[in-house]
Image (cartoon, coloured by chain):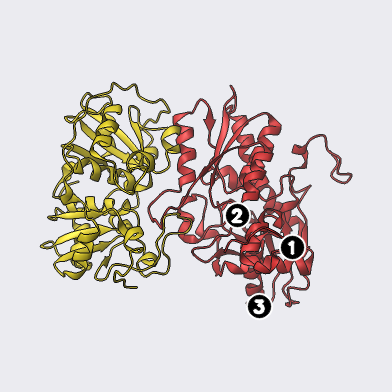
Amino acid sequence: MDHQKRVYENVFEMMPSEENPTPLVRINKLNPHAEFPLYAKLEWMNPFGSVKDRAAWFLLRDLEEQGLLADGRGLVEPTSGNTGISLAGLARARGHRLLAIVPNKVPYEKKVLLKIAGADLEIVSDELCPAPGLGDGSINLAKTYAKAQSHKYVMPNQYENTHNVEAHVKTTGPEIWKQTEGRVTHLITSLGTCGTVTGTAKFLRSKNPDIKVIAVQPTEGHDVPGLRNVSQLEVSKLFNPELVDEILEVDFNLAYTRALELCQNEGLLAGPSSGLILEGALRIAARDPRGYGVMIFPDNIFKYTSNMVKHIPELQPQDSNRRTER
Amino acid sequence: MANYVHPEILVDTDWVKQNLGKSGIKLVEVDVDTKAYDAGHIPGAVGFNWQSQLQDQVRRDIISKSEFEHLMSEAGISPSDTVILYGDNNNWFASYALWLFKLYGHKDVRLMNGGRVKWLNEQDKELTPEKPKITPTQYRASEPDLSLRALLPDVLQAQKDSGVNLVDVRSNDEFTGKVIAPPGMTETAQRGGHIPGAKSVPWSTAVAPDGTFKSADELTKIYLEDKGVDPKKNTIAYCRIGERSSHTWVVLKYLLGLNNVKNYDGSWTEYGSVVGVPIEK
């Protein structure tokens, strides 16, 4: 394959790597700190539209190599959307099926996209009431399928599978190191399964132990799809606090307003989690005198129009007959 | 399970594994979302849907005695059976079912400590999607034991009477009226807040991280010492729709052994909608 010409024999050749990185784009108008440039790594440029392509590809290939997808066995995975879209797209293209267990709060657009990508969908009503000690409903249902019907389903388990981390050790980290020519001083990312932060930080720290790793999390009670507040992190076995210098808590409403600013000022159609990460990065750039920040922007805005209208009612088109739910 | 006043109300997951398939022992999974049961359950367990099978489908009420008898008969349960209940959401709905079984006089009904999540996460425990073959019975229930159930008049009386412990097991935001119901819930009320005089003890304070009940000493400290639930008084537990309060009802009545503990199944969706009743925020 020739990444220069960008001609590929199949979609798998397009998966990101050091030779075929997702772009790094500098933030210009929104970052007033000249001594602290911020670069956004546009993960929506991956074939299935998000950072989750990386983990999904590594998880899928591992299952194939272990022979666990033979004899018609499919995959089952709890997902808030992006992992499911990547896994479904990749799995179907490889000839496998995916049953995605989706929390009800996941945006409508993502649920439809999952079906378009070829997933079978099971929607569960998670978080009936604030409940410390409870497992996550979608994770437990996926585990149930994998345990009770192991002849039909295998669960990659993005929350525990170290290949999720490995994907970023092998791709995201080396890409950033090469793209910044080793100048990166700060990595700013969000927390979900924690595969991205753990894997990328692990690689970058191996190159330069002084690189600061900042995780940005939404305030409790948030509705930013795909992200977790630290109080929700116990579901992920991949979080390694030694690799994170600080966790910044940001009002989750800023995820939406900052995303809109990115769209309207930088030409970057970034989704809410990217907005949250930008806010965190700007706080770091305002505080530390100089640096070279790289932000992982997980996906773009297209899946989140209804969330955006909910948080920013002015986005509701005036001639629309759709009623805004408040 | 040592030191609980009535340890026999609980069995642990290992006990269930050792007793799988034994005659006279019936397993029932009780879920609000029965997708979990359909995907996989403990071998031999029947599944009850809390919404469609444990509640009257026309008026707001528990199922009638004859409906309970029908449910038991169709599930192959006899009055002499030891029934083991477990379910999703930390056994809330299984606890509600336990309350219903006790209300209709079933002698030996117990809860699997930790619920379906604990079983699921233990390596040596099996799950199956196969539904059990059932031989129907002719179950006869007792008249309902209404001493276990608080209705609105009992609650209004209790609210005026300092001789009754009112225990609100909802989250702090529901207790203070910041929210009427947790986000996304369809069952709600006209007003937020709590019943005047109620003590706030969220249900989750009774459980350990693995979903099992805390020790008797810990529960005594939480309910009796820290929150001031007076064991000499009668007690009414309530939540929003009566399922979380069933969980606390098990704690208060069986694990701590308080006398005369009632579950107010009308809970906040009833009380918070009644015209003219006093509310605190």
Which SS class for mark 3?
A: helix
Q: Which chain is yellow?
A: B
Q: Is residue A293 above or below residue B123?
A: below
Mark 3 — on which chain does it sit?
Answer: A
- Image position, residue B87 (x, y; %): 35, 41
Label for residue A286? 3
Residue annotated with mark 2: A202
Badge 2 or badge 3: first in the primary sequence: 2
Q: How many marks?
A: 3
Q: Are marks 2 and 3 on the same chain?
A: yes
Q: Earlier in the sequence, mark 3 or mark 1?
A: 3
Compared with A246, B53 (above or below) is above
Residue, far left: B232
Report the chain shown in red. Answer: A
Quadrant where the image shows the C terminus of chain A? bottom right
Q: Quadrant of residue B22?
A: top left
Mark 3, Cα crowd under 10 Å, few <14 / some 14-19 / many 20+, is: some
Element type at mark 2: helix
Residue type at mark 1 is Asp
Reading the image, the residue beneath label 1 is A319
